[in-house]
Image (spheres, rainbow, N blue to C red):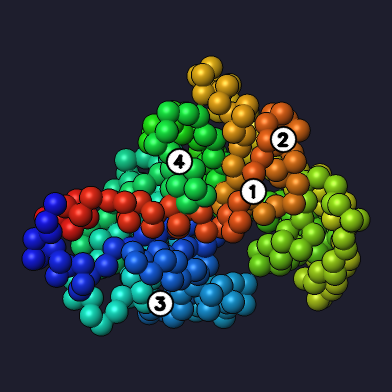
Amino acid sequence: MAIPLIGKVRQIFSHDIGIDLGTANSLVFVRGEGIVLSEPSVVAVDTDTNKVLAVGSDAKQMLGRCPGNIKAIRPMKDGVIADFEITEAMLRYFIRKVRKPMNIFKPRVLVAVPSGITEVEDRAVKDSGTRAGASSVHLIEEPMAAAIGVGIDVQEPAGNMIVDVGGGTTEVAVISLRGIVDSISKRVGGDTIDEAIARYVQRRYSLVIGERTAEYIKIEIGSCCPIEGGEKTLEIKGRNLAKGLPSAVEISSEELRPVIREVAELMVEAVRTTLEKCPPELAADLVDRGVVLAGGGALLRGLDQLIHEQTNLSVTVPDEPLLAVARGTGAALEGMDLREAYGL
């Protein structure tokens, strides 16, 4: 099909953007360029003037370290918008950062969202994106985007299971013929593990730690199965509740494992529940194809082993699972019909 002149002009002077708007991190894919931005989903605001002071990595550095008039906010909770105005400011920052001077048309934006969001949450994402500078906002379900992003052929008539573990949600879906046959969106993820670690450290050592420290512990020594090559230890620092003074303690991966495994079991429960609802023919496909993990939570040590132990299915962790959803939005953009993509 020949592209009208206005369509060619729009291809040159505009661009489509895919956004993985995550609870913990947001990634931006620009059509024709790939993933160009990856930032924490954090915004720092001056509460006296309501002025946005920083977004992304700069704002995350302020978590737990701000004076009274500055608040570092994570506007996404459980994969959906918890603070509309701050989310709009964050989206505006992302869109402006990736736009180039030659892009005279507003970008069309495709946003990945949890499969279980409500109509109100759906509308909130679209409205926030439009007010942030998008010409139009379209949504794609995170499991579908993740499946496309890890290279699954979602068009074939066969069952594929994708488990996308993000900061706020665990998305489990069985996909066949370009559609989600069964899915569960469970509001448990990497942030839930961070919170569990912080509670354990406070209860066991009377040491109060911030969310950045809890996340660091999870990344460095967190596991839900025994670690090959031996257990690890880590010195952590915080404020001693009894003395009210800065203090340091040493913790091990072994003592943290029951805390992390308790949360991981909730993720596995979502997988088992989805499998129980799966049609027999698609369940048979999964015996051969197994489960594919995506999202930052896929990097948790032993999560793949735990799922395998409780489902008897093979589990694959692709390279760079954190980028799966963003890559999927990009592939969806690249594959869209030009008439739909440019409103011709």
One can see residue 295 in this view: yes
Task: Residue at 39% x, 36% y: name it.
Answer: 155
Task: Residue at 36% x, 74% y: name it.
Answer: 98
Q: CA distance from mark 2 to mark 4?
A: 22 Å
Residue that mark 2 sits on: 308
Foreground tag (2 vs 4):
4
How many neighbours does mark 3 have within 10 angstroms: few (below 14), some (14-19), or many (20 or more)? some
- Determine which of the numbered discs, if any, sits on residue 317 in the image: 1
One can see residue 166 in this view: no
Q: Amino acid at mark 2?
A: His
Q: Are marks 2 and 3 in contact (CB under 8 Å)?
A: no
Which of marks 2 and 1 precedes in the sequence? 2
Q: CA distance from mark 1 to mark 2?
A: 12 Å
Q: CA distance from mark 2 to mark 3?
A: 45 Å
Which of marks 4 and 1 precedes in the sequence? 4
**SS for callout 1:** loop
Q: Give the left or right position of residue 59, taking residue 109 as reference.
A: right
Which of marks 4 and 2 precedes in the sequence? 4
Q: Amino acid at mark 4?
A: Asp
Query: Which quadrant holds residue 28?
Result: bottom left
Could you say where residue 34 lies in the image, as x and y percent from the top left? Answer: 42, 66
How many neighbours does mark 1 have within 10 angstroms: few (below 14), some (14-19), or many (20 or more)? some
Residue that mark 3 sits on: 52
Q: CA distance from mark 1 to mark 3?
A: 37 Å
Q: Amino acid at mark 1?
A: Val
Residue that mark 4 sits on: 153
